[in-house]
Amino acid sequence: MNSEALLEAMWKAARTAAGAQIKDLRGYLDKEIAAIAKGAIAIEVDLLSGRIKQSQAKRAWDDLADSAIDIQLAVEVILQAAAQDAINAALGVASKALSKAIGFAII
């Protein structure tokens, strides 16, 4: 087996496999960050217009910041899935290459 060719094939498979998850992550973060921005603007508008008091603005901000914890947890799950997909794809390439080199299916 050519180690450089194998490594390149494994990286290519890993990038492709993780790519879909990363694309989903980008879309998810775009949506969630936009929601936080809208929330922050709404707090500002409501506070400056007198619709809410400072204490209510603080509570609204705390709620908004708390939602970021859920976003962080979701991002961690997506990244773990991307890593697992990448590793599985790389292992698949290595398994096929090894099986071909030794003349029998290793898995």
Image (spheres, grey):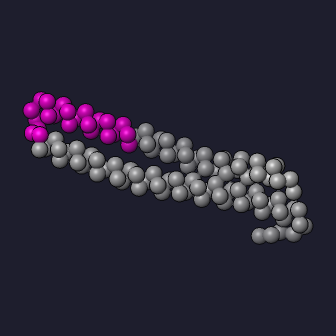
| Placement of 90 over or under 50, stated as above or below | below
Describe residue 9's horizontal placement relative to residue 41 as left or right.
right
Q: Which residues are magenta?
A: 32-54
Is residue 57 shown left or right of residue 90? left
* Position of residue 39 in the picture relative to residue 16 (left or right): left
Q: Is residue 94 depicted above or below 23 in this figure? A: below
State the count of labels: 0
Residue 45, given in percent of the width and then of the height, sits at 18, 31
Q: Main secondary structure of the magenta part?
A: helix
Instruction: Check the image and report above or below for 64 versus 46.
Output: below
Residue sitting at x 76%, y 51%? 7
Towards the viewer: 2 or 77:
2
For residue 44, what is the image quadrant? Answer: top left
Q: Residue at x 23, y 48 (%)?
A: 62
In the rendered view of the protein, which quadrant contains the C terminus? bottom right
Q: State the residue lying farthest toward the front.
A: 3
In x, y percent, where is residue 46? Answer: 16, 34
Q: Position of residue 29 (x, y in %)?
A: 43, 42
The verdict on residue 52 being magenta is yes
Q: Is residue 4 magenta?
A: no
Which residue is located at x 82 percent, y 49 percent?
5
Where does the N terminus fall, quadrant-wise? bottom right
In percent of width and height, residue 64 lies at 27, 46
12 or 35, nearer to the observer: 12
| Residue for point 82% across, 59% down | 97
In this picture, residue 6 sits left or right of residue 63: right
